[in-house]
Image: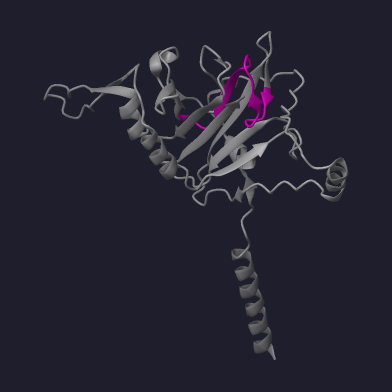
């Protein structure tokens, strides 16, 4: 009578183990993954106080309303507005924490519309701007790495906005958990010309070879004397001020770098304690060569 009992207990333990192994991993949104990397932020290791992110206390600007002609009779317009409820917002994409245990790499950016006193208010990235509007945008990464921002002119070519000769002599290495406001020492002001300002943002753990050769003049120094063959080759980087980056090059980088990314657009109505208007882009792979890319399109009419 004892053998069947032991066999039954062994079967139960095996089934429990299989169930535990098959338990699905917790799925996190891009914003949750972004802040999951803050378990041991750099400021906590060094003891230095982390500078607080600057947030405006001004009332958020209302979305711009665009008037459109509607040729339907009044009765039909009323009926349609009553019969058709607002479409539900799609659920944000999710992913689990990296299986390797490494933190996910993420980028947060937000558009700041400037008031007359230069106070910035967070607005949606799809806001339609008008002549006279002035904006800046803020970029924050959840790890130290290398930041590249290029913007597209009317010619179709792209020019670097960051790195900038105005900031640390053109050094593009940034710290994690620190917001960087762009343009570094100026503002984007919209004139009467209708169009779209296109910005392409790349953030990576390692320097991006393609962008490094396009933006910098890399000057490799020769090795030291033969007496010290173990000395590494050192290099210095100097900004190329008038560089143009082709649209083809940006399209190629976008196609290669954008894989595995998840994106979440949040506003004050998004569930959670943090009330903000921002976009989170996260690479959840946890690989050593992780990179994040984002397209920012600023429309003005």
Q: How is the image coloured?
A: one colour
Q: Residue 68 vs residue 215: left or right?
A: right
Position of the C terminus by quadrant: top right
Q: Nearer the viewer, residue 135 or 289?
A: 135
Where 64 falls versus 5 (above or below)? above
Image location of residue 148, percent across then percent down:
44, 28
Q: Residue 193 vs residue 154: left or right?
A: right
Q: Quadrant of residue 55?
A: top right
Residue in the image at 23% along x and 27% along y: 233
Q: Nearer the viewer, residue 252 or 146?
A: 252
Q: For the magenta stretch, what is the residue range? A: 122-145
Q: Nearer the viewer, residue 278 or 192?
A: 192
Inspect this view and state whether residue 185 appears. yes
Residue in the image at 38% along x and 41% along y: 252
Inspect this view and state whether residue 53 appears. no
Residue 225 is inside the magenta segment: no
Residue in the image at 58% along x and 32% along y: 108
Q: Quadrant of residue 161?
A: top left
Which residue is outermost to the top?
117
Image location of residue 210, percent across then percent down:
33, 34
Residue 134 is inside the magenta segment: yes
């Amino acid at each position: 009578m004892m053998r069947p009992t032991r066999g039954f207990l062994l079967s139960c333990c095996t089934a429990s183990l299989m169930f535990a192994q098959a338990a699905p991993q917790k799925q996190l949104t891009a914003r949750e993954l972004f802040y999951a990397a803050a378990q041991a932020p750099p400021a906590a290791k060094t003891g230095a106080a982390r500078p607080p992110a600057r947030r405006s206390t001004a009332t958020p600007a209302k979305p711009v309303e665009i008037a459109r002609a509607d040729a339907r009779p009044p009765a039909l317009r009323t009926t349609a507005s009553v019969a058709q409820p607002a479409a539900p917002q799609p659920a944000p994409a999710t992913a689990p924490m990296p299986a390797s245990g490494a933190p996910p790499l993420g980028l947060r950016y937000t558009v700041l519309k400037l008031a007359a006193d230069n106070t910035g208010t967070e607005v949606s990235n799809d806001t339609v701007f008008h002549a006279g509007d002035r904006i800046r945008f803020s970029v924050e990464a959840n790890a130290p790495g290398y930041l590249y921002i290029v913007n597209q002119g009317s010619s179709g070519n792209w020019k670097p906005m960051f790195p900038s000769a105005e900031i640390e002599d053109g050094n593009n290495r940034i710290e994690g958990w620190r917001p960087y406001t762009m343009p570094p020492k100026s503002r984007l002001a919209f004139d009467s010309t209708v169009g779209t300002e296109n910005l392409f943002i790349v953030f990576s753990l390692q320097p991006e070879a393609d962008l490094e050769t396009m933006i910098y003049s890399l000057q490799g120094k020769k090795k030291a004397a033969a007496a010290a063959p173990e000395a590494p080759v050192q290099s210095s980087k100097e900004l190329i001020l008038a560089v143009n980056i082709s649209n083809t090059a940006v399209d190629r980088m976008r196609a290669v770098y954008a894989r595995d990314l998840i994106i979440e657009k949040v506003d004050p109505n998004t569930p959670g304690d943090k009330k903000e208007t921002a976009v989170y882009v996260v690479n959840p792979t946890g690989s050593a060569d992780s990179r994040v890319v984002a397209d920012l399109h600023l429309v003005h009419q």
